[in-house]
Image: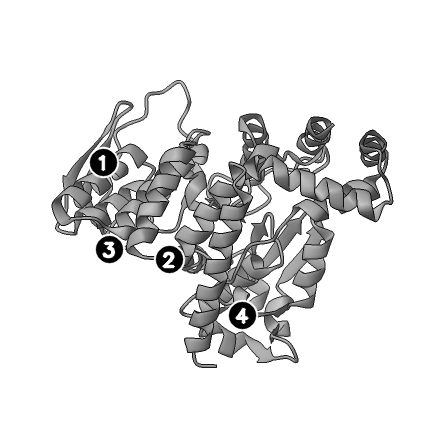
Amino acid sequence: MRQTLEAVLKETIGLDAASIGHSAVERALQARLRACHETDVQAYIELVRSSAAELQQLIEAIIVPETWFFRDRGAFALLADWATDRRSSSTHPEPLRLLSLPCSTGEEPYSMAMALLDAGIPADGFCVDAIDISVNSLALARRAVYGRNSFRNAQATFRDRYFSAAEVGWQLGDAVRRQVQFRQDNLFAADFLPGAGLYDVIFCRNVLIYFDRAGQDRAIQILRRLLPPTGLLFVAPSETNVISEHGFVSAKIPMAFAFRKDIAPASMPKPAMVATTSPVLSPHVAAVVRSDAEAVVEPAHESTLEQAVALANAGHKAEAARLCDLHIKTSGPSAPAYNLIALIRAGGGNAVSAIANYRKSLYLDPNNYEALTHLAFLLQKRGDVPGANILRARARRIQSDQNREKPT
């Protein structure tokens, strides 16, 4: 019966139940059975199939929002630089159109707006469409009152500029809220955002990991349709391999995880790509010569680990992992090196290796919030719910301690 329900979820919203753990689907099912005063699982499955309202309630029971302001800060720095250059290169610039998908409880699209406002982009110079399947998450996003967990970035000075203290948490000001339009929609709906080249920038982060390969193919086809050749697509660190395999090329900006369409004709061989030593585009690698077989690296003067980060951001994951191994052999055990290897392994589908490397990273740096949350996700995906909960509890304590240390 559970498998039938999982098939319904995959068909309607693309969810691969293995990505969140079959036990998570089972818990949501049991919660909805109690809410509906139903004991017959088959009858409930038929209800989900016939009732859009109950399907939505099931989705709400499964979704657990996990986001915060300026998550992966490099992405927002690149967004601001790109938008500034785009406007300065035109005498009559058109307003920029941006998309946050899924937008969850609003931290990401509001961060996009704040980054652009901070960069001097006028309010009439851009708009952000924010889409999510969760009605509950969208209600919280529109309310725009946030607690400490939403301000996990150590450089949270933006809170003083754009928020005011509320009875519980902080209320986002109207100057930012006016720039973002929220709507409920399903990426896998047949009528999802008709048209092509609709958005100059798309943030689609931490959602592809919840789809199987067929679902990823379908989602990326939609993203390709929505993005013009000059646009930017931002994904999560663990999703860069998937995007690279679907005809997108890295923007080669460290820690931004940004991609563009590869518009070279498929029938033509791709030329070797050389990354310059420009302090804007590639500060860590002197030259990267890419062929279909391998990437050959000519080291710059920066550390091996910095080169590995740059290579990983450019899509050269195997070479980045080798440089991490070299860094560990030459410089000794390193939490950042193990963490990067874990990200690469997770992105490549090797959960066992990713888990082992996250554990090594946490042994050396027990308070690494990102490693704790990523490892918790992988453990839950493999069915170790108690282990995942322990790690999330540790992460919450660390975040709470960090918030207490920050000036208010």
Q: Give how far apart the Cα atoms at labels 2 and 4 are.
A: 18 Å
The image quarter in which residue 76 lies: bottom left
Give the mark count: 4
Is mark 3 in CB contact (under 8 Å) with mark 1? no
Q: Position of residue 348 (x, y in %)?
A: 40, 32
Q: Which mark is residue 88?
A: none
The image quarter in which residue 406 lies: bottom left
Q: Amino acid at mark 1?
A: Arg
The residue where tag 2 is placed is 368
The secondary structure type at the circle numbered 4 is: helix
Is mark 4 in CB contact (under 8 Å) with mark 3? no
The residue where tag 1 is placed is 322
Is mark 1 in CB contact (under 8 Å) with mark 2? no
Q: Which mark is residue 279?
A: 3
Identified at 25% across, 44% down, the residue is 308
- Relative to 408, 340 lies left or right: left
Q: Residues within 10 Å of mark 4 (few under 14, many from 20)?
A: some
The residue where tag 4 is placed is 148
Q: Give how far apart the Cα atoms at labels 1 and 2 are.
A: 23 Å
Closer to the camera, 73 or 324?
Answer: 324
Q: Give how far apart the Cα atoms at labels 3 and 1 are.
A: 24 Å
| Mark 3 or mark 2, earlier in chain | 3
- Relative to 252, 17 lies left or right: right
Q: Amino acid at mark 3?
A: Pro
Q: Position of residue 311 (x, y in %)?
A: 27, 41
Location of residue 76 with respect to 63 vertically, above or below: below
